[in-house]
Image (cartoon, coloured by chain):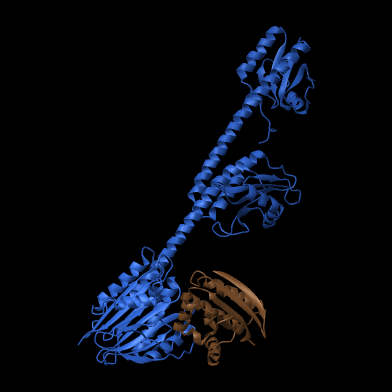
Chain colours: A brown, B blue
Amino acid sequence: MNLTVEQIQGKAPVTILGLHGDLDASNYQEVIAKAQTIYNAGGRYLLLDMSDVPFMGSSGLVALHAVAVLMRGDKPADPASGWDAIHAIDRDRESGMQKHVKLIAPQQQVDRVLDRTGLKQYFEIHSDRETAIASFG
Amino acid sequence: MTHSEYVPLRRLLERGVAEAFLASFERLMPGAEVALLGSDGRRFAGRGDWPLAEAAAWVARAAEGQTGTVADARLYPLTTKSQPVGALAVRGPVSEDVVRCLRESLNLFLDQALEKREVARETLDRYREINLLYRIGETIGASLDPDEIPRLELREAQRVIPADVGAVLLPPAGGIGDPLEVKASFGTGEQVTALQNAARDLIAQVRQTGRPDILAADEAPVGTVLCAPLKAGERVLGVVLFGRAAGQPVFTAGDEKLVMALTSQAAIAIEKAWLHQQELKRQRMEQELAIGRRIQLSLLPETCPSVPGWELAALYEAAQQVGGDYYDFFELPDGTGRLGLVIADVTGKGVPAALMMAFSRAIIRTEAMSGRNPADVLERANRIIVQDNRSQLLLSAFYATLDTRGGQLAYASGGHDHPFWLHAATGVCEELHSRSLVMGAFPFIALEERAIDLAAGDLLLLYTDGVTEARAADGQMFGEARLQAALAANPAASAGEVLRTIVGAIKTFVGEAPPADDLTLVVVKRNGS
């Protein structure tokens, strides 16, 4: 899988992470690592461009979830912090869809996986970059 | 090897030969006495009484070519390669010409003898080196510990190459990575650091060329450095460094050769040890996989429950790697004759996935046994899984309760593939949708619960994504349409036969390609009344 990073100055500064190729067990950690780099560099709003991802395995779900958690500024669930961490996640849940990571144009198979697993309740999906960028801020 | 040591005459000349030699001279010079005196104050050959102690003292002082007189004896120093070995003592009527002739003959004789001796000694040195290399080969070759070999190598090398500091530098982990690390050394920590600093460019050069080289560094505390590659075949694994303090002799080409002989043996041993470790690691991984597989298999139901009016068939087929698929059946203990059905898929592979599967199975089972309805069971199980999910793995699960008397199936899905419901009456294949969310990520999920009524002859198929995502050699996936077609191919058949038909269709589609993911399928059939 190839990853491309693009910075866009919309109403808010947005980073577009382009995924190119299948997203599966062999590379989902690369996506998490790249998102961490973007977060560390100050990025807070991330668009995952899925238009060039023909296939997403279940490991891709782990990547999407971890990216959403870390872009929110939380460490991916740390069991040591117990219920506090859980409640922090819960607040997010109560406010509905998370606001930091959105998806652009998933292909059919990826869309089906998102639908099946219920992650569409959690990730806003846009069919093109322009509306996706405009949706932040 | 130094040549400045004292060599006694007896080591250079055979006494009988010397006696015969002197006697033949005495015959040329009647009335004269001739003898060879050692610098140890003994007479080595010849006749007569001589002031031995004084002569020895004179030999020790005498310069080359100088002659001297002690009592009535004339003394002429004997040297081999400029080293005094004794004196020729002459007394009586002898011409200087004859004496010179005698001295020159003797000196020549002694030079040759010394040369012979050195050749012999060099042979002995070679022999010792060969012996040493052989021993090193044995010691190092017997070790399969990649940390021990560099230590052994330095210990053995120190026997033949005098040095003040030395180090073996190799990649950090099992031959992989940069920069090189010190794996063994002798000398103080400060010396080793100084050696590395002095040799930085030399190390890079030697790794590049694969040839040893010597550096005359004049930075104290390192005066001279010898760097040799650790070469297994053409591959440079690392380097060996030796250093001598400033003022010590510079390393020689001979040292280089010797070190190369040592390092080539060590390099082969190190590579062998690395391979051995890789093999151990592979074995450990295989063991881990076997453990994961055992966990997984031990938790799958051994047989499908036998329920009057129903047929159940299930299959779990493992891919090469351990996945986290499972299915489960259990009778609910509330006396209503309801049967619990679970199919689930943990993301990820290996032992973590197998453990997550075991954990999730136990929780879902426990929650289900309380008699709660499916959505409640999955929501509560999810909360416990999230709370305790150290692995960050996610889980998709479908849980249904089947009223085996009335045929009603109540279900909820935690992000799992939608099961198929084949209506016997119409031949229509319906997907069991419900609002759903993958488990293990969010602590509070709200799942939708739905219910359907299975009629006589109806088929229900539960599966994991390993089935729909099974790929043919050209990368195409089996997909839902083919799965539905296979399910509907022979609706009158038993659940077991339907399962075999589906598996056959997958196998035909995938061909020779090894399965990438586990295949898990459960078929439920309501028999005709």
B198 left or right of B443 in image:
right
Q: In this view, does B36 lie to the left or right of B482?
A: right
Number of callouts? 0
Q: Please identify the residue farthest to the left as the structure is shown.
A: B529
Residue drawn at x 76%, y 10% as measured from the top left: B94
State whether residue B100 is above or below residue B86: above
B36 lies above or below B299: above
Relative image position of residue A57 (x, y in whole percent): 46, 74
Give the image quarter of residue A14.
bottom right
Residue situated in front as seen by the camera: B267 or B246: B267
Q: Is residue B286 above or below residue B255?
A: below
Tell me the quarter of the image containing the C terminus of chain B: bottom left
- The answer to whether residue B393 is visible is no
Instruction: Please give the name of the residue rendered at 72% of the width and 8% of the height, measured from the top-left corner.
Output: B31
**In front: B184, or A91?**
A91
Q: B400 above or below B79?
A: below
Task: Please identify the quadrant where the N terminus of chain B is shown.
Answer: top right
Q: In the image, what residue occupies the spot 52% across and 80% down?
A: A65
Image coords of residue B421 (percent x, y): 32, 84
How far across and down, in percent of the image, does residue B279 sit? Answer: 45, 58
Q: Is residue B356 visible?
A: yes
